Image (tube, rainbow, N blue to C red):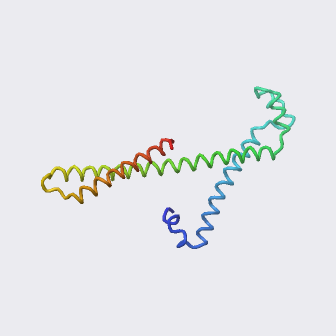
Amino acid sequence: MLHYLLHASAVPWQDQLLYAGLILLAIALVFAGFWWRRRAARPRQGDFAALVAQHNIAQALAAQAESPLKDAADAWQHTQHTMEQVTSGVERALALILALLSGLMCAISVSAVISDVWNFPAVDWSLFAFYAGLGGLCAWFTRVQWRIFRGRR
């Protein structure tokens, strides 16, 4: 699927429509689940046993009078919060993967610099500078991605 995101113009419009529909269906299902859970948690009109089971009877009586539209508004807020959590979770997972890969590249560059220094009289300075620069760039990128993974900007 990442291939489709990188090369969206090469993907047929039917596939793009399918993926968009699946994403919208997932959001609609999350919303419907929150709305149904909110409606199911409310005591029904005249259900006194459910009212007594609530900790605050005044709030339970007020909850009986709430409209389904209020439940839908609350469910939409929960859906937005959930989608933000999913987005931040995906960003953090990608940041972790990128931090690990760039850390591996940094380790490879550092080992190349150390092996080049090991043969001191016969040092290829252009290759040494390339790997030193690449190692520094990878170390910086690893630090940035690790901070994003940890939640600091």
User: Foreground: 72 or 118?
Assistant: 118
Residue name at image x 27 percent, y 49 percent = 110
Residue name at image x 50 percent, y 47 percent = 92
Residue 122 x/y as whole percent: 13, 56
User: Foreground: 149 or 63?
Assistant: 149
Side of 123 where 139 appears, left or right: right
User: Foreground: 137 or 47?
Assistant: 137
Residue name at image x 61 percent, y 72 percent = 14
Q: What residue occupies the far left of the structure in this picture? A: 121
Residue 50 x/y as whole percent: 79, 31
Residue 123 x/y as whole percent: 17, 56
As drawn, 2 above or below 78: below
Residue 63 x/y as whole percent: 81, 36
The tally of labels here is 0
User: Foreground: 56 or 152?
Assistant: 152
Side of 71 where 16 appears, left or right: left
Residue name at image x 21 percent, y 57 percent = 125
As drawn, 51 above or below 1: above
Side of 143 where 128 appears, left or right: left
